[in-house]
Image (spheres, rainbow, N blue to C red):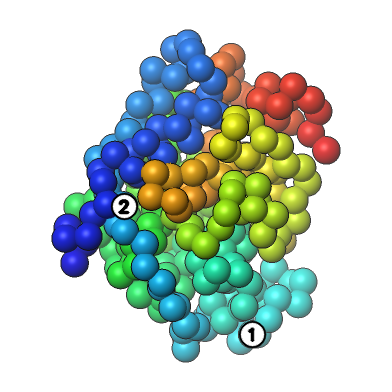
Amino acid sequence: MMRETVLSRTAFVAAAGTALLTLVGCGGQRTQDATGFNDDRPVKDKMDAGATSGDSGDADSGSGTDSGSADAFDTWSDDCWDAHRNISIAALLELKGWQLQEFASQQGYTWQDALEMYEDEAGHVLSVCNISKDGATEWLGEDEIGKLDKGGTGSTVMFTLQLSGYSSCEDVIAGFSVPVEDRAQITSGSWIACVYGSNMARHVAMASPMENGDYRLDLITEEAIKTGTFTQGGGAPTIDEFWQEKTGRALG
């Protein structure tokens, strides 16, 4: 089981720390405040998940495809998976918390209470944390995740997914099945993008490499960006201001 196939506890820790430190920058108090991401969170060796679609749908909608309506996207949608049969960024953006939990369960993910994350037999990880104004982080419990709106909109949260099958961070972002306003490389190995859901709420997505050859995808709400945790100056920056700081150019 999980403990027997742990690749290395440093794999997820390194990816988690690198992800936030890349967004924050290379120095200053904000970096020190962000150490809450360096939790002892394992990553398993990757195998072929061979995931198949679940049989139950969203109680709010009987539609099997995304026809453009916010209610049309549910756990039946093909867009819930990416090209490599990982949970997709579209699923994070378009499913409410309880729907995402239902979909993850259909795909064989189980809640690991001690680690506060979902994990499947192939080692894919799904977790959500709350970002506080002072830079502290708190990994959300199962009940708290279930209460989130689509994409965590209205909450200061960051979703984290472990992805397999990609060749680079740029490849991860190029495979998004959601509108991408802009994308940029911010380190030699990490990329960020500004993305939209059907509710037109903007999010920052970041792809970063992991030690075992997988990729970590972080999806951060605009509310979380406004805590100032991800910028050197703190305050309450918009996504546009965040983008300018990280890339040296305007968004768009």
Viewer-side residue, 5 vs 27 = 5
> Could you classify mark 1 by the number of other residues whose Cα lies within 10 Å: few (under 14), some (14-19), or many (20 or more)?
some
Q: Which of marks 2 and 1 is in front?
A: 2
Viewer-side residue, 6 vs 196 = 6
Determine whether 136 is above or below 209 in the image: above
Viewer-side residue, 232 vs 211 = 211
Q: Quadrant of residue 194?
A: top right
Position in image of residue 17 (x %, y %) = 40, 32
Amino acid type indicated by mark 2: Val
Position in image of residue 67 (x %, y %) = 76, 77
Q: Which of marks 2 and 1 is nearer the N terminus?
A: 2
Determine whether 158 is above or below 80 in the image: above
Asked whether disc 2 touches disc 1, contact meaning CB atoms under 8 Å apart, the reply is: no
Question: Where, quadrant-wise, is the N terminus in this rendering?
Answer: bottom left
Q: Name the residue under label 2.
A: 43
Residue visible at 58% across and 37% down in the picture: 190
> Left or right: 3 with respect to 81?
left
Which type of secondary structure does the marked residue at label 1 adopt? Answer: loop
The label number, if any, that marks residue 64 in the structure image: 1
Residue visible at 40% across and 26% down in the picture: 34
Amino acid type indicated by mark 1: Gly
Residue 119 visible in the current orientation: yes
